Image (cartoon, helix red, strand yellow):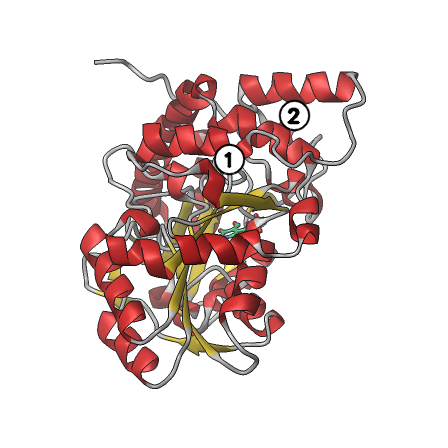
Amino acid sequence: MRVITPLQALPLDQLRQRSSTKWRKFGDDVLPLFVAETDYPQAPAIREALSRAVASGDTGYTPPEPGVADAYAGFAERRFGWTVDPGRIRTTCDVMMAVVELLRRVTAPGDRVIINPPVYPPFFDVVPEAGAVVESVPLVDTGAGWELDLVGIEAALAAGARAVLLCNPHNPTGTVHSRETLATLADLAERYGATVISDEIHAPLTNLGATFTPFLDASPVAARVGYAVVSASKAFNLAGLKCALMVTADDATSALVRELPDEIEWRTGLFGAISAVAAFSPESDAWLDAQLAALDANRLLLRELLGEHVPGARYRVPDAGFLAWVDLTSLGWGDDPAEKIRREARVAVLQGPFFGVEGNGHVRINFGCSPDVLTEAVRRIGSLVG
Ligand SMILES: Cc1ncc(COP(=O)(O)O)c(C=O)c1O
């Protein structure tokens, strides 16, 4: 068996030289575990590709076929066993813009779109941005994990909802939806003439012990009713570079994407495309595995740390991603414990209520950092426990 050495996060003094939101929003006395950026050194293939581009002044417009679709098709085959036709992929600048543009075309103004809170906060904003209306069908807490409420989703579709904006894997719970769940969702969508848009940005970060099912690969029906939006930006920390892919698996859905205005594709960042090609290439697989090993250790370390320092916290180890959904209700710190934690412990975590009312009393902790930073952050939070 191949031994994977976990990737080591950069030290804080180096990270504080970064100029991204994570490092500039708060002062140096605050440990930033809020926004979804990670603290690892960049994958070598990406570093080299971007360095070459900077050195040659390669800073113009993105060409029609920058190689991203082919690179992604290779990645999907290697990592998920999913065969994707590169001819059925188009790029744009980021995942949320892809979602808005797709929603605009599969809904009419005023249509209802189902989302499953607690969920990535911008889902609440992109639906109205596309002229539609949010219909919340919260995840079900099974006691052991979270699941889509397929009964609730069916009721909403039967009552006229036109689309489901799915988070697969789910942010903030790290839930990796099962093939059966996704296939049933697809059947429901087809029965009621609705569309599923599956945001799969966290998919490359599925823990090595779990199995990610791409929505379009869940069943032949899913391939007909769905659009997937993917990106290298979470797994490879490329959010500032702007490149996302709209993936389809059927003639009608491919035609809709092909007929999107060219302007949408022109918004793809050239550095985003260059880095996505490097990220999705086989050369970056070992780096990704090393990062997954580091995240696997951290998600378990967090459980230990919370048990020791914040025993009232409720946390389930996620199956994907670098985000932990932590229920602090029992501590009596109110609906929005993140405020108190930032003010009094100098740790920035993301506010649970941003994810919907289901997030009251919760925080989201980004553990894509060094074990030392994670330990210090939880120790600081623990110092507030009376
Ligand atoms: C589920 C989900 N979708 C989309 C995004 C943002 O993607 P982008 O910056 O490409 O719009 C994030 C960022 O954390 C996310 O968690």
Q: Nearer the viewer, residue 60 or 336?
A: 60
Name the kind of residue labelled 2 in the image.
Gln
x, y percentage for residue 179?
22, 51
- Distance between the Cα atoms at labels 1 and 2? 34 Å
Name the residue at 70% across, 16% down. Answer: 52
x, y percentage for residue 94?
60, 48
Q: Are marks 1 and 2 in contact (CB under 8 Å)?
A: no
Q: Quick one: SS at disc 1?
A: helix
Question: Which residue carries the number 2 mark?
Answer: 14
Image quadrant occupied by the C terminus? bottom left
Name the residue at 43% across, 78% down. Answer: 135
Q: Is residue 343 left or right of residue 162?
A: right
Question: Which residue carries the number 1 mark?
Answer: 69
184 is higher (above) or lower (below) than 58: below
Let me know if residue 314 appears in the view: no
x, y percentage for residue 35?
56, 49
